[in-house]
Amino acid sequence: MNAATLLERLQAYLPVLLAGAAHTLLVSAVAIVAGFMLGAVLLGLSTARGGRGVLPALVSVYVSFFRGTPLLVQLLMVFYLPSAAGLELPPLAAAMAVMAANSAAFQCEILRAGLSAVPGGQVEAALAFGISPRQVFRYIQLPQVARAVWPAVVSEAIDVIKNSAIVSVIAVADLARGGRQIVAANFRPLEVYMTVGVAYLLMTAAVFAGGSWIARRMERASAASTRVVNRTAIRT
Amino acid sequence: MIDFTLLGELLPVFGQAALRTLVLVAVGMAGGLVLGFAMNAARETGVRALTALYWAYTTVWRGVPFLVHLFIVYFGLPSAGVRLDPFQAAALTLAVYSGAYFAEIFRACWQRIGRGQIEAARCMGLTRRQVFTHIACPQALRASLPLIANQAILVMKESALASVITYPELTMTAGKVVAEQFVYVEPYLLLALAYWALAVLINRLGGYLRRRVAL
């Protein structure tokens, strides 16, 4: 077990792990983007008509279910229940659907918290000044909500990447599955799974670094617009 | 559609499995809380090596999926001479994994305490240690309770992965029923309901504790 052979072995793992990482990133990206859109729709449904009625109640049951049960259980249910009815879902599609539905529940709550970060007075003041509701959303609510939810969305993205390892259980050829395949062939679980761990760490660290960079840029933009407001505001 | 006699037959089996899940979660939580508290206390000493250890621990353990940690501990450690049974492996991994999150929770709550309080206490002649136990601890621990309850639900959800290394908790039990009796709807329905009930239970417990310690 000298260093050169370890290096050679790692080189041999590389193609399998890279192919796996590509699947992990694909599933995660679909889950985050589709989860965001579905989460926004859920939030819209739950705040419609003042948050009363059947729809908001259904949304809260949905959110409570997806946040209160393990992703593995959700995955097994979606993968095996249709097969009981004779319907075969391809594993990759089932994995993406469950991960997106799961992330939507979390992102719905993130957006809800973000929206409440904009004081109602601002919206009322803007409307009183004759700014259209569309512009109020675009120029007043959206930038502030984006800034407020961004750190939570980044941390959700990291959670999604980590949770995506679970899809290997239903035979999606992701990074964790790649590790299992290599171990099945060479019986070196310690070094293979640690390599897989490092690969996940690199991905989550990259998302974290990128997310922090964008957060800093948003802070700078916010500080700049505050300076403009302070310079042009009518002093009383 | 749903076979209620089967549901009745499955209930005691699932009850036992839920108990195993609860024990696993309780052991993992206890270990994680102790480890997380110790790591944060080590960081609070201000010793540079301990602070570096804290960052390495929380970064590595929070940046890698629980499943991969579990594989390293259960499948990997035997080749380093450490052989654990499924329960030990799952409980240990759960403890160290959740410990990283608890450490971050404690750190956030510790850093929320006003600097002025700490400085005032130090001016009054309290030692660092006394500040930690008498000023910071009571406030930070109280503030951390809701976050700990939240994390407990995450620990419970991660515990489902113990089924992958064949520890017969809830998820594994449901899988076994499915494989042996070729029924799908009842076991999975019961499984989801069991976890959901546990989540609600933990949530309630957290709320109760929070009211108990509220000022």
Image (spheres, rainbow, N blue to C red):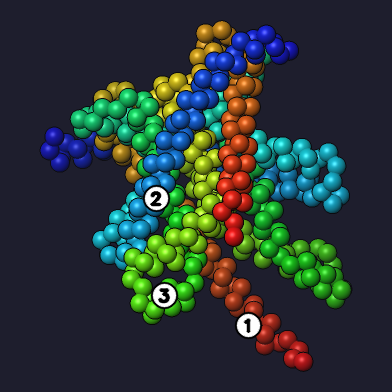
Is B173 left, or right, of A187 in this rendering?
A: right
Residue corresponding to mark 3: B121
Residue B116: in sight, yes or no? yes
Which badge, 2 or 3, is on the more N-terminal residue?
A: 2
Residue neighbourhood size for the residue with mark 2, other residues' Cα within 10 Å, grouped as few (<14), some (14–19), many (≥20): many
x, y percent for residue A233:
73, 86
- Residue at position x 53%, y 58% in the image: B143
Q: Please name the amino acid that badge 2 sits on.
A: Gly
Residue corresponding to mark 1: A227
Residue corresponding to mark 2: B36
- Residue at position x 44%, y 40% in the image: B29
What chain letter is assigned to the residue under label 1? A
Front one among B75 and A82 = B75
x, y percent for residue B187:
60, 17
Residue farthest toward the bottom in the current orientation of the protein? A236
Front one among B137 and A11 = B137
Closer to viewer: mark 1 or mark 2:
2
Residue neighbourhood size for the residue with mark 1, other residues' Cα within 10 Å, grouped as few (<14), some (14–19), many (≥20): few
